[in-house]
Image (cartoon, rainbow, N blue to C red):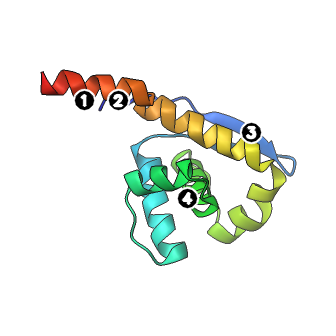
Amino acid sequence: MVINAMPEMVRFEANGKSYGMTFDLMALAEAEQAYKRQYGEQINVYGIISELTGGSLSALMAAAYGAMRSAGEKMSWDTFARHILPACDIDWWTETVSAGLVALFGSASDADAAEGDAKN
């Protein structure tokens, strides 16, 4: 699997303030830690991605929070969950997090092609 080492920051506005999200390895580690802290379950990145594809709001929140923390945003989980997340449409969050992860990892077809190349 090839990881994009130079992801672009996604900027957005919520409640009249500008925020950023960066989808990189730090964001993934932050998402894993946030998921464990908030939901009491250890889950790795692949578990979060799997839950995201199944429509899990918990995984979406952990991934978005991790990306914001990785971009340097300083906020508590409570501030994120109660004030920032509700300020944007849930479809926007889903599309933005999904696009950020695809940019980081590549598309599923890219991952399949890389796996096939590795076996050859």
Nearest to the eye among marks 1 and 3: give it: 1
Q: Which residue is mark 4?
A: 59
In the rendered structure, the answer to whether residue 18 lies left or right of residue 70 reads right
Placement of 92 over or under 29, stated as above or below: above
Q: CA distance from mark 4 to mark 1?
A: 25 Å
Q: Secondary structure at mark 4?
A: helix
Q: Which residue is mark 3?
A: 12
Q: Secondary structure at mark 2?
A: helix
Q: CA distance from mark 3 to mark 2?
A: 29 Å
How many other residues sit within 10 Å of disc 4, few (<14), some (14-19) or many (≥20)? many
Q: Earlier in the sequence, mark 1 or mark 3?
A: 3
Say if residue 21 shows up in the picture: no
Disc 1 + disc 2, Cβ < 8 Å? yes
Q: Which residue is mark 1?
A: 115
**Residue at 71% across / 65% down in the picture?**
81
Nearest to the eye among marks 3 and 4: give it: 4
Locate the C terminus and report the quarter of the image it occupies: top left
Q: Which residue is mark 2?
A: 111
